[in-house]
Image (cartoon, grey):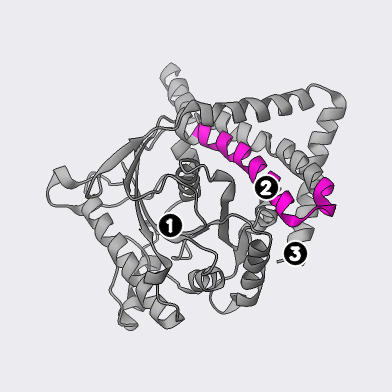
């Protein structure tokens, strides 16, 4: 019985981080909402500057748990610039932790507040978060024929007009690579074969629409495109078969010892402008990802597995960049919960913030 209790407690290591991250959300939304109202009469760029700073505080707290708390080793390969840039970030997609990987790179460039996502439309209904991601510059898109190119272009143009720093994260596969759902992988491979494209093993066939719209709309605003390939160590079973990548709860439970990130910085002049040619270019980039992942997972020489080729850097996040945000947001939330009026405001923020958010995203793109 004691052993069972210990094992159960061990498996619940994600509870505290999850409670803090979700528990501070109303506090964050209140602070952001107050600034949103105060800045209503100011130029949009003033709102964005403070909003980016607020976002940096919250996401720094998130990274405290995903890096400092878990002790995961972040191993970076390739050419990640030290300075912040206006970029589009293209990555393979296998789990929800992929969102956090973008934060891990951005904070190392002092660009954490600039991270904005292209997200599938259904995520806009997330309580508090769904509404806020849109307010922060995120773009919700529908798949295939329902994709609204005009809406995405208008939102990106509004960001450029407000001189919004851009670290736009796109997962071109459109859905996660999941070894436990072989039909999705098989359908993706069949589509590639039908279209005369290379069949990919460890990634899905990428979709070009969102990537093309983003690059085409912001081509004179961007500095570069980051082509990012991510691999989580420990995702191969005893038979050498690839397993499901860690979920956020598994990652926070310290079940991933190392995450490997390969970055290739690409100049805009090296990317075709026409969608037809960009589609071919994007597929070629995913062929490169696939080769990297084949080397990572399937290399015949065991010494070459669990790493990407080339030089790497073990990058550790300093507590100076994450702990102050945890203490600040945690302290604000605790002080609110200590009073009856604060607790009422806290609960009302969860309830009314969610309702207003759902109403807002149902009206506005």
Q: Is residue 343 magenta?
A: no
**What is the distance, in whole Å, between disc 1 and disc 2 at their CAs?**
29 Å
* Helix, strand or loop at mark 1: loop
* Helix, strand or loop at mark 3: helix
Look at mark 3 in the image and give the residue it sits on: 362
User: Looking at the figure, which quarter contains the C terminus?
Assistant: bottom right
**Does residue 137 appear left or right of residue 103 in this picture?**
right
When asked about the image quadrant of residue 363, the answer is bottom right
Look at mark 1 in the image and give the residue it sits on: 93
Query: Circle 3: is it few (<14), some (14-19), or many (20+) Cα within 10 Å?
Result: few
Among all residues in the image, which is located at the extreme top? Answer: 2
* Helix, strand or loop at mark 2: helix
First in sequence: mark 1 vs mark 3: 1
Q: In the displayed structure, would residue 10 be above or below residue 191?
A: above
Q: Nearer the viewer, residue 138 or 124?
A: 138
Q: Residue 146 placed where, x, y %?
A: 60, 76
Magenta stretch in the rendered image: 37-65
Look at mark 2 in the image and give the residue it sits on: 49
Q: Residue 224 placed where, x, y %?
A: 44, 61
When asked about the image quadrant of residue 76, the answer is top left
Q: Nearer the viewer, residue 226 or 45?
A: 45
Kindly tell me whether residue 169 is visible in this rendering: yes
Residue at 28% x, 63% y: name it: 288
């Amino acid at each position: 019985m004691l052993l069972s209790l210990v094992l159960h407690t061990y498996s619940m290591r994600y509870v505290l981080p999850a409670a803090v991250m979700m528990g501070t959300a109303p506090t964050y939304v209140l602070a952001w909402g107050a600034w949103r109202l105060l800045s209503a009469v100011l130029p949009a760029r003033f709102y964005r500057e403070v909003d980016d700073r607020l976002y940096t505080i919250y996401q720094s707290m998130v990274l405290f748990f995903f890096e400092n708390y878990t002790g995961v080793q972040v191993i970076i390969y390739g050419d990640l610039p030290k300075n912040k840039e206006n970029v589009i970030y293209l990555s393979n997609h296998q789990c929800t932790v992929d969102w956090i990987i973008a934060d891990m790179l951005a904070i190392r460039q002092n660009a954490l507040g600039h991270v904005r996502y292209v997200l599938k439309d259904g995520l806009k209904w997330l309580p508090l978060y769904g509404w806020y991601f849109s307010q922060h510059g995120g773009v919700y898109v529908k798949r295939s024929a329902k994709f609204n190119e005009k809406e995405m272009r208008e939102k990106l143009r509004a960001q450029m007009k407000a001189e919004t720093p851009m670290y736009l994260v796109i997962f071109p596969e459109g859905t996660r690579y999941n070894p436990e759902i072989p039909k999705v992988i098989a359908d993706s491979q069949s589509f590639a074969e039908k279209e005369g494209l290379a069949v990919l093993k460890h990634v899905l066939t990428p979709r070009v629409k969102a990537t093309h719209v983003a690059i085409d709309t912001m081509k004179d605003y961007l500095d570069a495109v980051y082509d990012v390939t991510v691999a989580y160590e420990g995702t191969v079973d005893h038979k050498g078969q690839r397993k499901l990548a860690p979920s956020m709860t598994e990652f926070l439970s310290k079940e991933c010892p190392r995450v490997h990130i390969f970055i290739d910085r690409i100049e805009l002049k090296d990317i075709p402008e026409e969608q037809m040619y960009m589609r071919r270019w994007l597929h070629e980039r995913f062929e490169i990802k696939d080769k990297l992942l084949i080397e990572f997972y399937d290399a015949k020489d065991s010494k070459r597995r669990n790493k990407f080729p080339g030089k790497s850097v073990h990058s550790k996040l300093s507590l100076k960049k994450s702990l102050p945000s945890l203490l600040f947001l945690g302290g604000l939330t605790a002080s609110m919960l200590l009073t009856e009026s604060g607790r009422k405001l806290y609960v009302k923020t969860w309830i009314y913030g969610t309702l207003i958010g759902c109403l807002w995203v149902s009206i506005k793109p």
